[in-house]
Image (cartoon, grey):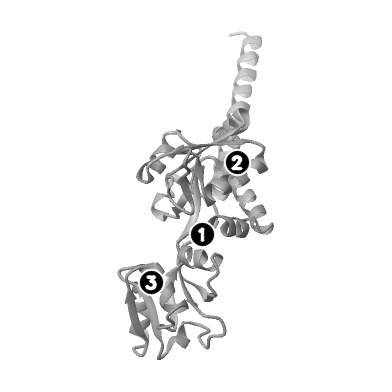
Amino acid sequence: MSQTRIAWLVARLRRRWRWSLLLLALLVGVGFLISLNPRAAQLLLRRDTTWHTIQAEQRWRVGLDPSFPPFEWLDDQGQPQGYDVALAQQIAQQWGVQVEFIAIGYDSLLDALRTGQVESVVSALPFDERMTEDIAYSPPYFDAGIVLATLPQTPITNTAALHGHLLGVEWGSMGEMEGRKLQRDDTTIQIQRLDSPAAVIDALVTAQSVDAILIDHVTLRIAQVNGAKLVTIGPMVESNPYVIAMPRLAYELHDAVATALQTLQERGVLTKLETKWFVGVK
C-alpha cells in the first residue's frame, strides 16, 4: 500500500473519530440535561405541538361536562354557561384565540384529552395525583374542599375553639367525616347531622341551632355571594382543588395556562367570576 493511501486512510479514521467524540459528547450532554431538568430537555428535544396547534388554528378546544352549575351548564339555546366557561374565555382572551367548547360526559373527559379530541379540560375537575403520569394539571383556580364557617363576631377562631360547641354537618359528607375526626380528638364537640348542604347553612344562619358548620367551599361561597353573613375560620380543613387538565408533554401550554391564571388572580378576576356566576344559585 502506498504512503499516500495510508495517509488518506489515517486522515479518514481521524475524521470519523472526531465525529464519534462529538456525538458522544452531545449524548452525554443531553443525558446530563435530562437528569438535571427533564422538562427543559423535553422542550429542547420535542416541540409542543399542542400549543402550536392552538396558535396556528387560533382555537383552543376545551372539554367540559355541562351538568354542574354554577361551574358549567347549557342555557335554553344549548350554549355553555358558567364559571368555568367564563374562565376559559378569559384565558383565551389573553392568548388572542377563540374557545371551542366540546360537551363530554364527565367520566370521558380525560379520555378525550388523551386521544386529542380536546387540548384541555376545564370542568370543575379535581386534582388527581394518580393521573399525573398521563395528564398535567394547572395550579388550582378554585378549592372546593371543606371549610369551617360560622357567623361574624364568633368566639370560635379555630378548630381548637370548637371545644364544647355544636357543629353542623351534612349526613354522609366529607364534612361529617372531618367532624368525626375533630370529635375523636375532643369529645366535648357535639355534631348535628342534617339532610343537605342548604339545611346546614340554614341551621347556622337562620335557626342558629348550631355554633359552626363544616361545609364544602362551593356551597359556602354560593351562600356568601347570595348575602349570607358567614365567615371562614382558619385554613381549609380538607383541600379539593379544581384544576385545568392538559396533555402531559404540552409544556408551553402548561406555562401559558399557569401565567394566565396568575394574571387573573392578581387582577381579582377569579373573585369577580364567583360573584357573577354563584349569585342566585340555590
Q: Nearer the viewer, residue 191 or 194?
A: 194
Q: Residue furthest top?
A: 2
Residue position marked by numbered label 1 in the rendering: 280
Name above or below for residue 18 compared with residue 141: above
Q: Which mark is residue 113?
A: none
Query: On the rendered structure, is 266 left or right of 211?
Result: right
- Which x, y percent locates residue 90? 62, 46
Residue position marked by numbered label 3 in the rendering: 199
Instruction: Identify the mark nearer the N-term, 1 or 3.
Output: 3
Mark 2 burial class by Cα count in 10 Å: few <14, some 14-19, many 20+? some
- Which x, y percent locates residue 109? 41, 42
Task: Kindly identify the residue that appears in the image at 57 percent across and 30 percent down.
Answer: 53
Residue position marked by numbered label 2 in the rendering: 252
Task: Kindly identify the residue that appears in the image at 33 percent across and 83 percent down.
Answer: 184
Task: Kindly identify the residue that appears in the image at 67 percent across and 53 percent down.
Answer: 263
Rounded to the nearest angstrom, the CA distance separating label 1 from label 3 is: 17 Å
Rounded to the nearest angstrom, the CA distance separating label 2 from label 3 is: 45 Å
